[in-house]
Image (tube, helix red, strand yellow):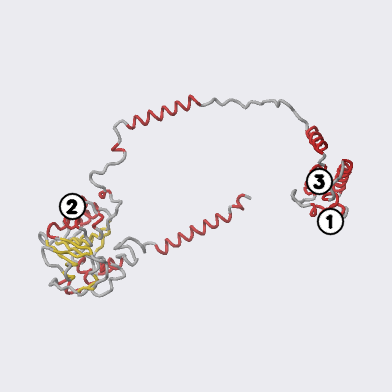
Amino acid sequence: MKLRAWRRPLAALGVLLLGSLLTAIALGGSSGGTLDPDSASADGGRALAALLQDHGVAVVPVRTTADAASAVQTASGGATLMITDPGLLSPGQLDTLAAASAARLVVVQPDSLSMRRLAGDAAGLWRAQDGQNRLLDPQCPDPDALAAGNADIGDGDTFTDTAVPGCYRLPGEGYALVTLTGSGSADTVLVGSRTLFRNDRLADHGNAALALRLLGKHPTVVWYLPDSADPAAAPEDHKSFTAVLPAGWRWGALTLVLAIALLALWQARRLGPVVVERMPVAVRAAETVEGRARLYERGRVTDRAAAALREATRARLAGRLGLPRTAAADDVASAIAARGGRPASETLAVLAGLVPADDAALVGLASALDRLEAEVGRL
């Protein structure tokens, strides 16, 4: 019975688990963060990663600062380090990436802190835009920008007062793309918008050409998506909870536990065998019945006495006839008649008839109920 009662909940749980599994299989790897190279969602970067690989550029996704620096150092032929969300990085992480000696550093929508740490004073100022899509022309002599043509790059940030002129200028606001050349062949590219790297916008205008030229200069692209779970993301002065506690807190906690244990042992009662206690008074069932009968007699409540007798008889008859003990008198009378007993009307008159007017009538009703039970017992 218990297993039968749990069948439906277990079946519903199984259907939910199966549905979740099928959904995970169908959508596995199709969603992720913004500009995630493994994400096929609208704001993902899988299309650009596949395009780079088709052109012979290896894409290495990383999620920690240490992995990004290590991948740049071990890449053969130079590597382009792309940081998709530099605003999530701490000063220590930014300094580590700046010292990674990447052949090209592409920083997407940097904030003021990341610009100062990654590009120094040459980065100038930046200004956040209203987020409206703007198609801009290069308006600069940069060969990569000229080859790509117009691009959706004017909906993010702009850079002003830079050491060198940039490209894709918004009148009166600044450049959406700035390339800063460092020592040797290394350079830093500041991109004010993520739009041209997205899956849903890569095929528009010159977005794909510009993205390929920005990231495809070297054989390897280290695609860094900052993650809050990165151990290096914690501030340098961050201390754990246990580190700020007094030196002797462990011994204090152990002493408290021992004191509580000793107190519990002291206050606990010893459990012995079960003690059988004799009842002070034994009352026979017959005496209980007689006492209740005398109360009915004294109160002259023949109606309640008759109802109690009929109710008890009806419940016993229902049990003998295979009916629920709560079956109505009509159902009991019909069942007796169906088994060849007295007619249903006569049985119903005994079980639910007139209320006895006096004690003699009550005694007669009790005798009639006894005879009815005897007759049913012989059926």
Task: Judge whether 97 appears above or below 203 on screen.
Answer: above
The label number, if any, that marks residue 338 in the structure image: 1
- Alpha carbon separation for disc pair 3 and 2: 95 Å
Taking the image as shown, residue 85 lies to the left or right of residue 324, namely: left
First in residue order: circle 3 vs circle 2:
2
Nearer the camera: disc 3 or disc 1: 3
Q: Secondary structure at mark 3?
A: helix
Quarter-wise, where is residue 137 in the image? bottom left
Q: Residue at x 31, y 40 (%)?
A: 241
Residue 140 x, y percent position in the rendering:
14, 72
First in residue order: circle 3 vs circle 1:
3
Disc 2 residue type? Asp
Residue 323 x, y percent position in the rendering:
76, 51
Taking the image as shown, residue 43 lies to the left or right of residue 139, namely: right
Taking the image as shown, residue 267 lies to the left or right of residue 354, namely: left
Asked if one can make out residue 168 in the rendered structure from this viewpoint, the answer is no
Disc 3 residue type? Arg
- Alpha carbon separation for disc pair 1 and 2: 97 Å
Disc 1 residue type? Ala
Determine which residue is flagged by label 2: 95
Quarter-wise, where is residue 145 in the image? bottom left
- Alpha carbon separation for disc pair 3 and 1: 21 Å
Determine which residue is flagged by label 3: 310
